[in-house]
Image: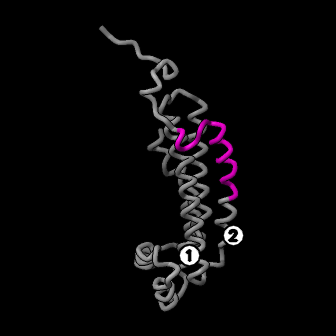
Amino acid sequence: MSEELKERREMDPEFQWDLSSFFVNDEAWETAFAEFEKDLDEISFYRGKLKDAETIAAYLKKEAESEIRLENLFVYASSRHDEDTRDSKAQAMYSRAYGLYVKMMSAASFAEPEILSLSDAELEKIRTADCLKDHAFYLENLIRRKKHTLTASEEQLLAGFGEAFAASSNA
């Protein structure tokens, strides 16, 4: 005897995901989504300014805060999408969140090439600066990848293709 599958709205809430730790509802998500555009502007503010340890530390702090906010937006939208893949509103939220992720990667794509354009002596001084001690591992890996890093414009072009590169896995 086959069991009839219930619609999500018919299921006991005890067996549903609680996404309220991210956003209380879709409207709160929409508000946070709209506010995230400011983060992109604040990330872009640092373009051409990543020349010293203090500025790089401030940039990395802002980028980390933005990534957490973006991750919350993305996880909520992705989870809403996975609740019912037929739900066109949830599909649109997921698509918009993914698009916002690509915008963020594109907006931040200047940073690594800009930092790596500094001389080896400057990079070593920055890597050992007290204000960047929490980012030491990141900076060591970044410096190690220096010869494999593209120019800022090439990195931005590559970051902009994020949605196209993901198309096959989203199909």
Q: Is residue 61 visible?
A: yes
- Mark on residue 103? none
Going 59% across and 80% down the picture, which residue do you hit? 54
Residue 148, visible in the rendered structure: no
Alpha carbon separation for disc pair 1 and 2:
14 Å
Would you identify the image quadrant in which residue 53 lies? bottom right
For the point 47% across and 25% down, the residue is 13
- Residue lying farthest to the top in this orientation: 1
Using the image, determine if residue 103 lies above or below residue 127.
above
The residue indicated by pointer 1 is 57
The answer to whether residue 15 is left or right of residue 101 is left
Residue span colored magenta? 20-38
Q: Quadrant of residue 47?
A: bottom right
Q: Earlier in the sequence, mark 1 or mark 2?
A: 2
> Percent position (x, y) of residue 85?
50, 30
Q: How is the image coloured?
A: one colour
Q: Amino acid at mark 1?
A: Ala
Q: Please identify the dominant SS of the magenta region.
A: helix
Where residue 158 appears, x then y in whole percent? 54, 62
Answer few, some or many: residues within 10 Å of disc 2's Cα (few below 14, many 20 plus, some between 14 and 19): few
